[in-house]
């Protein structure tokens, strides 16, 4: 059976991952390492699941690569340079999965959004997360915007009519031509809404997450499949 180590084991997601792996009949919960623990505590793992801030994640992934361990990462906010480094570190094997969102419903929302992209003239994304999330916009929102833009095949959107942003940032950030808005709310886990508009109609796609357990089927799916996905795999789609 596959032995699964967890980096960030005492965080909210880390604790949930540990419980999910421990409850799986075909997996063994292995080393559980947190931010102040030495990374060699992960020794003996076949796959390491990583849920930490970006800096700790990079340190942990360098260690995993040097020790030949596959890694499954839920951390978001990596720079392009960091992703390039990870591609060099994980030529396959060892293999790496960088997953912006492990909720299968969130991935299906992205797929539906890709289908909608060519049929509307405006699009905006709003993401909402718990009040401990430090990066904005979310990795899911960025990935969604990029996928919508790619599916549109270079066609431009209707021009933004805003000529005076009375409050700076009121129109949100822009990812490949799509406005993205972020909220951080106490009591929430995660939510994303994509709104498409065109003459006389609009379409809203929304996915809500009420508990961290909703991510666990996706986490376990990737853990089970990572050994068969050479190199670096981005997002959950490849495992569905």
Image (spheres, helix red, strand yellow):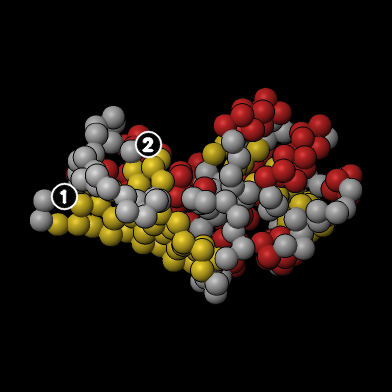
Q: Residues within 10 Å of mark 2 (few under 14, many from 20)?
A: some
Numbered disc 1: secondary structure: strand
Number of labels in the image equals 2
Identified at 65% across, 38% down, the residue is: 96
Can residue 231 be spotted in the picture?
Answer: no
Q: Disc number at residue 176?
A: 2
Instruction: Point out residue 192 in the picture as x, y percentages from the top left corner.
Output: 42, 59
Q: Disc number at residue 50?
A: none
Residue found at the very far bottom of the displayed protein: 187
Instruction: Point out residue 124 in the picture as x, y percentages from the top left corner.
Output: 32, 51
Instruction: Point out residue 197 in the picture as x, y percentages from the top left corner.
Output: 20, 52
- 211 to 107, vertically: above or below: below
| Mark with earlier residue (2, 1) | 2
Q: Residues within 10 Å of mark 1 (few under 14, many from 20)?
A: few
| Residue nearest the viewer, comparing 179 with 142 | 179
Q: Disc number at residue 198?
A: 1
Can residue 176 be spotted in the picture?
Answer: yes
Identified at 57% across, 61% down, the residue is: 215
Q: Left or right: where does residue 123 sit relative to residue 106?
A: left
- 90 to 16, vertically: above or below: above
Identified at 27% across, 48% down, the residue is: 164
Residue found at the very far left of the displayed protein: 200
Identified at 72% across, 39% down, the residue is: 58
Mark 2 to mark 1: distance in Å?
Answer: 19 Å
Numbered disc 2: secondary structure: loop
Quarter holding residue 160: top left
Instruction: Point out residue 59 in the picture as x, y percentages from the top left corner.
Output: 77, 40
Q: Left or right: where does residue 201 sit relative to residue 13?
A: left
Contact (Cβ within 8 Å) of mark 2 with mark 1: no
Q: Left or right: where does residue 103 sit relative to residue 4?
A: left
């Amino acid at each position: 059976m596959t032995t699964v180590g967890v980096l960030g084991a005492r965080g909210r997601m880390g604790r949930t991952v540990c419980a999910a792996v421990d409850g799986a009949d075909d997996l063994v919960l292995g080393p559980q390492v947190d931010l102040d623990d030495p990374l060699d505590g992960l020794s003996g793992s076949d796959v390491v699941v990583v849920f930490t801030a970006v800096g700790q994640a990079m340190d942990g992934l360098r260690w995993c690569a040097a020790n030949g361990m596959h890694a499954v990462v839920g951390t978001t906010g990596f720079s392009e340079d960091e992703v390039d480094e990870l591609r060099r570190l994980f030529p396959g094997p060892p293999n790496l999965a960088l997953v912006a969102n492990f909720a299968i419903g969130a991935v299906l929302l992205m797929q539906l959004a890709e289908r909608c992209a060519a049929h509307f003239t405006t699009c905006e994304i709003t993401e909402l997360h718990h009040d401990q999330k430090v990066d904005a916009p979310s990795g899911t929102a960025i990935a969604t915007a990029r996928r919508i833009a790619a599916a549109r095949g270079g066609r431009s959107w209707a021009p933004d009519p805003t000529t005076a942003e009375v409050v700076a940032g009121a129109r949100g950030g822009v990812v490949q031509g799509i406005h993205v808005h972020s909220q951080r709310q106490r009591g929430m886990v995660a939510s994303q809404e994509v709104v498409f508009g065109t003459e006389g109609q609009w379409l809203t796609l929304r996915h809500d997450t009420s508990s961290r357990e909703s991510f666990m089927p996706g986490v376990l799916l990737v853990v089970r499949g990572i050994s068969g996905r050479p190199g670096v795999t981005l997002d959950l789609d490849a495992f569905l």
